[in-house]
Image (spheres, rainbow, N blue to C red):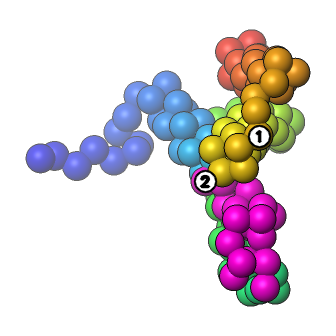
Amino acid sequence: MDICYENELPKSKVVMKDLLTGAILYLIGQVLVWFQSNGQFIWKWFDENPILISIFSGTVASYVFIIGTKYIVTHFQGLLWPAKFISFGIGMAAFATLTWLFMGEELTMKTLVSICLSFILICVQIFWK
C-alpha cells in the first residue's frame, strides 16, 4: 500500500479534506459540549461533579474546536465567518438529535424547520462561491 502525502493530492481533494476534517471535529466538539452541559440530567455523577466535567471535557472540546476552526478556515482561504456558520449549523443538528435521543424531547415542526434552516446555512457557506 502506497502512502499518499497531502502535497501530492490534487488541490480540490486537499481542500475538501480540510472541510470534511473540520466538520467532523466540529461535530465531535458539539457532542462533547452537549454531554458536558446536559449530562447532569442523565447521570448522577455528572450532576455531582460539574467542576471535573468542565475541566476535562471542556479542555478537550476547546482543543477540538480550535483545530476544527483551523481546518475550516484553511478550506475557505482565511475566511472566519464560514467557520462560525458551519459550527452553528452542525451544533443545531447535533443538539436536536442528542436531545431527542437522550432526553426524549420531540422534534416539533418548529425544531425540524430550524434544523432544515441550519443545513441550508451550511450549504450556503460550502456551495455559494
Q: Tell me which residue sits at (76%, 33%) in the image.
A: 106
Element marked by disc 2 = helix
Image height of 3 relative to 106, above or below: below
Look at mark 1 in the image and give the residue it sits on: 105
Coordinates of residue 61 in the picture (x, y in percent): 70, 65
How crowded is the residue under tag 1: few (<14 C-alpha within 10 Å), some, or many (20+)? few
Magenta highlight range = 28-48
- Residue type at mark 1 is Glu
Figure quadrant of the C terminus = top right
Q: Please tell me whether residue 34 belongs to the stretch shown in magenta.
A: yes
Q: Which mark is residue 28?
A: 2
Name the front one of labels 1 and 2: 1
Residue type indicated by callout 2: Ile
Q: Is residue 83 visible?
A: no
Q: Nearer the viewer, residue 82 or 76?
A: 82
Tell me if 102 is positioned left or right of 55 in this view.
Answer: left
SS assignment at label 1: loop
Is mark 1 in CB contact (under 8 Å) with mark 2?
A: no
Is 34 in front, or is 5?
34
Question: Which of the two labelled residues, at mark 1 and mark 2, occupies the earlier sequence position?
Answer: 2
Residue 122 drawn above or below residue 3:
above
> Is 128 one of the magenta-colored residues?
no
Q: Position of residue 37 (x, y in %)?
A: 80, 64
Viewer-closest of 32 and 47: 47
Does residue 97 appear left or right of residue 6 in this picture?
right
